[in-house]
Image: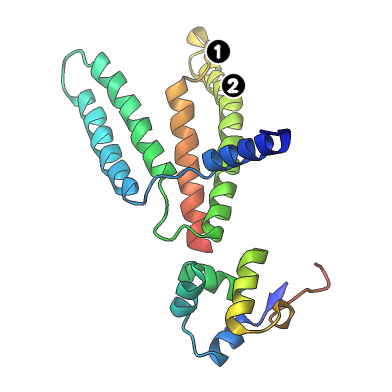
Amino acid sequence: MNLKTISECEDRKIQKYLNFRLPHQYKKIGWIGFVLSFVILISTKFFDGNYSVLVEILKRLLLVFLLLVVLSKEKVEDEMIKSIRSQAFTFAFIGAVAYTLLQPVINLIVALIVKPEKAIFKDLGDFQILWFMMIIYLVVFMKLKKRA
Amino acid sequence: MKNTLKVERAINNFTQEELAKKIGVSRQTINSIETNRYVPSTLLALKLSKLFNKPVNDFFTLEEED
């Protein structure tokens, strides 16, 4: 195999990964799973008991179901949808970086005003960042799609 | 870039839905192109050209700011 053929193979492989999307029906599965996990997660707050393990599992499930929604195709996945998707991914990426950098500072400033004795600088957790990024992606994607 | 896709569609007596099916996109995409909210790729422009049997320049034209 010569160098050109190897490079073409690599390009094709990269394109295959870049264009990877789940079939449209995964969107419904994702939303149902997301709503169920969310409802159970919220309901643990209203019952006494130690649900820390369950909460951690539910948080991860929530992210997995959101990822299914994010990665699944639209009914007609054409070039305009791909373009909108790309804009939404860019926006969500920039938004997540800005959120990760600014939110801890805002939290600290608010804490300094409200309870200065307990004010500490604390970074955001991975769940919060990933959750924010995917929600921003979905909101922007839906808004752009509706406007198109 | 402006276009006369709506006129071409009317000449050929296609609905947005029919045209969308023929070139493999959604009706929303056809609507967005017609209202100048989306600029299609060369591939899509050539598919339209083939379908209307006209050169792309006949229904897509550059504007001064392009």
As drawn, A142 above or below B23: above
Residue B10 rendering spot, x and y as whole percentages: 54, 89
Q: Which of A2 and B39 is in front in this view?
A: A2
Which residue shows up at 78% across the image and 73% down it? Answer: B62
Which corner quadrant holds the N terminus of chain B?
Answer: bottom right
Left or right: A89 with respect to B18?
right
- Residue found at the far right of this picture: B64
Residue B14 rendering spot, x and y as whole percentages: 49, 85
Say what secondary structure mark 1 lies in.
loop
As drawn, B54 above or below B30: below
Which residue shows up at 40% across the image and 45% down it? Answer: A22
Residue A32 rendering spot, x and y as whole percentages: 26, 43
| Residue kind at label 2, given as amino acid type | Val
As drawn, A111 above or below B37: above
Label 2 belongs to which residue? A105
Say what secondary structure mark 2 lies in.
helix
Residue A147 rendering spot, x and y as whole percentages: 52, 62
Q: Earlier in the sequence, mark 2 or mark 1?
A: 2
Report in which chain the residue with disc 1 lies.
Answer: A
Residue A133 in sight from this viewpoint: yes
Residue B40 in sight from this viewpoint: no
